[in-house]
Image: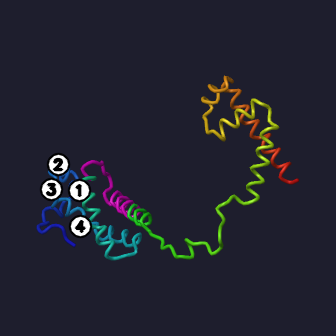
Amino acid sequence: MKFIKNQHKINEKNDTELILQYKSSGDLEVLGALYNRYMHLVFGVCLNYLKDEEQSKDAVMQIFEELVVKLRIHEVQNFKSWLHVLARNYCLMAIRKSSKNNTVSLEETFVENSEFVHLDIDDTKEQQLTVMEKCMETLPDEQRISVDLFYLQEKCYKEVAEITGYEMLKVKSYIQNGKRNLKICMEKNSSE
Protein backbone atom coordinates (compact mmCIF):
# COMPACT_ATOMS: atom_id res chain seq x y z
CA MET A 1 0.00 0.00 0.00
CA LYS A 2 1.93 2.99 -1.27
CA PHE A 3 0.33 6.38 -1.76
CA ILE A 4 3.04 8.18 -3.70
CA LYS A 5 5.41 7.45 -6.56
CA ASN A 6 8.13 10.09 -6.37
CA GLN A 7 9.21 10.48 -2.77
CA HIS A 8 12.96 11.13 -2.74
CA LYS A 9 12.65 14.86 -1.81
CA ILE A 10 9.75 14.28 0.56
CA ASN A 11 11.48 11.51 2.51
CA GLU A 12 14.21 13.92 3.58
CA LYS A 13 11.72 16.02 5.57
CA ASN A 14 10.57 15.27 9.12
CA ASP A 15 6.93 14.86 10.17
CA THR A 16 6.46 18.47 11.28
CA GLU A 17 7.82 19.82 7.97
CA LEU A 18 5.53 17.53 6.00
CA ILE A 19 2.51 18.56 8.10
CA LEU A 20 3.26 22.24 7.51
CA GLN A 21 3.79 21.62 3.81
CA TYR A 22 0.50 19.71 3.57
CA LYS A 23 -1.41 22.38 5.48
CA SER A 24 -0.12 25.13 3.23
CA SER A 25 -0.42 23.29 -0.09
CA GLY A 26 -3.11 20.65 0.44
CA ASP A 27 -0.93 18.30 -1.61
CA LEU A 28 -2.14 14.73 -1.05
CA GLU A 29 1.22 13.37 -2.22
CA VAL A 30 2.86 15.05 0.77
CA LEU A 31 0.22 13.66 3.11
CA GLY A 32 0.60 10.24 1.49
CA ALA A 33 4.34 10.25 2.15
CA LEU A 34 3.75 11.16 5.79
CA TYR A 35 1.03 8.53 6.21
CA ASN A 36 3.13 5.91 4.44
CA ARG A 37 5.69 6.12 7.27
CA TYR A 38 3.11 4.94 9.81
CA MET A 39 0.65 2.94 7.72
CA HIS A 40 1.94 -0.37 9.09
CA LEU A 41 1.33 0.89 12.63
CA VAL A 42 -2.21 2.04 11.74
CA PHE A 43 -2.88 -1.37 10.22
CA GLY A 44 -1.62 -3.03 13.41
CA VAL A 45 -3.91 -0.91 15.59
CA CYS A 46 -6.89 -1.67 13.35
CA LEU A 47 -6.13 -5.39 13.29
CA ASN A 48 -5.82 -5.39 17.06
CA TYR A 49 -9.27 -3.83 17.49
CA LEU A 50 -11.23 -5.13 14.50
CA LYS A 51 -9.75 -8.67 14.45
CA ASP A 52 -10.27 -8.91 10.69
CA GLU A 53 -7.58 -8.36 8.05
CA GLU A 54 -9.83 -7.10 5.25
CA GLN A 55 -11.75 -4.81 7.58
CA SER A 56 -8.43 -3.47 8.88
CA LYS A 57 -7.19 -2.73 5.33
CA ASP A 58 -10.42 -0.84 4.64
CA ALA A 59 -10.00 1.03 7.92
CA VAL A 60 -6.47 2.10 6.95
CA MET A 61 -7.87 3.69 3.80
CA GLN A 62 -10.78 5.31 5.66
CA ILE A 63 -8.43 6.75 8.26
CA PHE A 64 -6.35 8.31 5.48
CA GLU A 65 -9.51 9.95 4.15
CA GLU A 66 -10.25 11.32 7.64
CA LEU A 67 -6.66 12.49 7.86
CA VAL A 68 -7.10 14.60 4.72
CA VAL A 69 -9.60 16.77 6.61
CA LYS A 70 -8.54 16.45 10.25
CA LEU A 71 -4.85 17.20 9.79
CA ARG A 72 -5.72 20.58 8.28
CA ILE A 73 -7.88 21.45 11.31
CA HIS A 74 -5.84 20.16 14.24
CA GLU A 75 -2.53 21.35 15.62
CA VAL A 76 -0.41 18.22 15.82
CA GLN A 77 2.81 18.15 17.82
CA ASN A 78 3.59 14.43 17.68
CA PHE A 79 2.10 12.96 14.51
CA LYS A 80 2.77 9.33 15.35
CA SER A 81 0.94 9.51 18.71
CA TRP A 82 -1.87 11.61 17.29
CA LEU A 83 -2.34 9.16 14.41
CA HIS A 84 -2.43 6.25 16.86
CA VAL A 85 -5.27 7.94 18.78
CA LEU A 86 -7.10 8.74 15.54
CA ALA A 87 -6.83 5.10 14.41
CA ARG A 88 -7.95 3.77 17.79
CA ASN A 89 -10.95 6.11 17.90
CA TYR A 90 -11.91 5.16 14.35
CA CYS A 91 -11.84 1.47 15.28
CA LEU A 92 -13.83 1.99 18.47
CA MET A 93 -16.49 3.90 16.54
CA ALA A 94 -16.61 1.14 13.91
CA ILE A 95 -17.06 -1.47 16.64
CA ARG A 96 -19.78 0.62 18.28
CA LYS A 97 -21.63 1.03 14.97
CA SER A 98 -21.47 -2.68 14.19
CA SER A 99 -22.72 -3.61 17.66
CA LYS A 100 -25.75 -1.35 17.19
CA ASN A 101 -26.63 -3.22 14.01
CA ASN A 102 -26.57 -6.69 15.56
CA THR A 103 -29.82 -8.51 14.97
CA VAL A 104 -31.40 -11.13 17.13
CA SER A 105 -33.41 -13.90 15.56
CA LEU A 106 -36.73 -14.42 17.22
CA GLU A 107 -37.71 -18.04 17.45
CA GLU A 108 -41.32 -19.07 17.77
CA THR A 109 -40.81 -20.20 21.35
CA PHE A 110 -39.38 -16.80 22.19
CA VAL A 111 -42.40 -14.92 20.87
CA GLU A 112 -45.22 -17.27 21.74
CA ASN A 113 -46.14 -18.32 25.22
CA SER A 114 -47.07 -21.98 25.54
CA GLU A 115 -49.57 -21.23 28.30
CA PHE A 116 -52.95 -19.73 27.55
CA VAL A 117 -53.06 -16.20 28.91
CA HIS A 118 -56.34 -14.56 29.86
CA LEU A 119 -56.87 -10.99 28.80
CA ASP A 120 -58.71 -10.35 32.07
CA ILE A 121 -56.82 -8.86 34.98
CA ASP A 122 -55.84 -11.65 37.35
CA ASP A 123 -57.28 -11.84 40.86
CA THR A 124 -54.26 -10.43 42.70
CA LYS A 125 -54.17 -7.25 40.62
CA GLU A 126 -57.90 -6.83 41.01
CA GLN A 127 -57.54 -7.23 44.78
CA GLN A 128 -54.73 -4.66 44.83
CA LEU A 129 -56.90 -2.18 42.95
CA THR A 130 -59.77 -2.74 45.39
CA VAL A 131 -57.44 -2.21 48.37
CA MET A 132 -56.04 0.94 46.75
CA GLU A 133 -59.53 2.37 46.20
CA LYS A 134 -60.44 1.73 49.86
CA CYS A 135 -57.15 3.25 51.04
CA MET A 136 -57.68 6.33 48.85
CA GLU A 137 -60.94 6.94 50.71
CA THR A 138 -59.09 6.96 54.05
CA LEU A 139 -56.71 9.76 53.02
CA PRO A 140 -57.42 13.34 54.14
CA ASP A 141 -59.24 15.29 51.40
CA GLU A 142 -56.22 17.41 50.40
CA GLN A 143 -53.99 14.33 50.01
CA ARG A 144 -56.67 12.26 48.24
CA ILE A 145 -57.48 15.00 45.73
CA SER A 146 -53.80 15.82 45.09
CA VAL A 147 -52.78 12.16 44.67
CA ASP A 148 -55.75 11.49 42.39
CA LEU A 149 -54.98 14.46 40.14
CA PHE A 150 -51.22 13.82 40.07
CA TYR A 151 -51.06 10.04 39.66
CA LEU A 152 -54.38 8.96 38.24
CA GLN A 153 -55.21 11.97 36.07
CA GLU A 154 -51.51 12.64 35.31
CA LYS A 155 -51.56 16.36 36.06
CA CYS A 156 -48.35 18.22 36.87
CA TYR A 157 -47.78 20.05 40.17
CA LYS A 158 -48.72 23.38 38.61
CA GLU A 159 -51.98 22.01 37.20
CA VAL A 160 -52.88 20.41 40.54
CA ALA A 161 -52.24 23.76 42.26
CA GLU A 162 -54.41 25.60 39.71
CA ILE A 163 -57.28 23.07 39.93
CA THR A 164 -57.31 22.83 43.73
CA GLY A 165 -56.23 26.35 44.65
CA TYR A 166 -53.57 24.94 47.00
CA GLU A 167 -50.12 26.53 47.13
CA MET A 168 -47.41 24.74 45.10
CA LEU A 169 -45.43 23.70 48.21
CA LYS A 170 -48.61 22.39 49.83
CA VAL A 171 -49.43 20.37 46.69
CA LYS A 172 -46.01 18.71 46.77
CA SER A 173 -46.40 17.98 50.45
CA TYR A 174 -49.92 16.55 50.03
CA ILE A 175 -48.76 14.29 47.19
CA GLN A 176 -45.70 13.07 49.08
CA ASN A 177 -47.62 12.43 52.32
CA GLY A 178 -50.58 10.95 50.45
CA LYS A 179 -48.34 8.55 48.58
CA ARG A 180 -46.65 7.46 51.81
CA ASN A 181 -49.97 7.02 53.65
CA LEU A 182 -51.45 5.13 50.70
CA LYS A 183 -48.49 2.76 50.65
CA ILE A 184 -48.73 2.12 54.41
CA CYS A 185 -52.47 1.50 54.17
CA MET A 186 -52.09 -0.86 51.19
CA GLU A 187 -49.35 -2.88 52.90
CA LYS A 188 -51.47 -3.19 56.02
CA ASN A 189 -54.62 -4.23 54.15
CA SER A 190 -53.03 -6.53 51.58
CA SER A 191 -51.71 -8.82 54.32
CA GLU A 192 -55.19 -9.36 55.74
In space, the residues marked 4 and 1 are separated at their CA atoms by 13 Å
**Dominant SS in magenta:** helix
Q: Quadrant of the N terminus?
A: bottom left
Circle 2 Cα neighbour tier, 10 Å, few/some/many (<14 / 14–19 / ≥20) = few
Identify the element where label 1 is drawn.
helix
Circle 3 Cα neighbour tier, 10 Å, few/some/many (<14 / 14–19 / ≥20) = few
Residue 177 drawn at (x, y percent): 76, 35
Find disc 1 in the rendering and name its residue.
68
> Which label sits in the foreground, 1 or 2?
1
| Residue contact between numbered discs 4 and 1, judged by CB atoms under 8 Å | no
Residue 42 drawn at (x, y percent): 32, 67
Under mark 1, the amino acid is Val
Answer with left or right where residue 164 lies relative to residue 177: left
Closer-to-camera residue (37/147): 147
Residue 148 drawn at (x, y percent): 69, 37
| Residue contact between numbered discs 3 and 4, judged by CB atoms under 8 Å | no
Under mark 2, the amino acid is Ser
Closer-to-camera residue (11/110): 110
Q: What range of the chain is rendered magenta?
A: 71-92
Closer-to-camera residue (1/166): 166
Identify the element where label 4 is drawn.
helix
Find disc 3 in the rendering and name its residue.
27
In space, the residues marked 1 and 2 are separated at their CA atoms by 13 Å
Residue farthest right in this picture: 192
Find disc 4 in the rendering and name its residue.
36
**Magenta span includes 88:** yes
Answer with left or right where residue 164 lies relative to residue 83: right
Circle 4 Cα neighbour tier, 10 Å, few/some/many (<14 / 14–19 / ≥20) = some
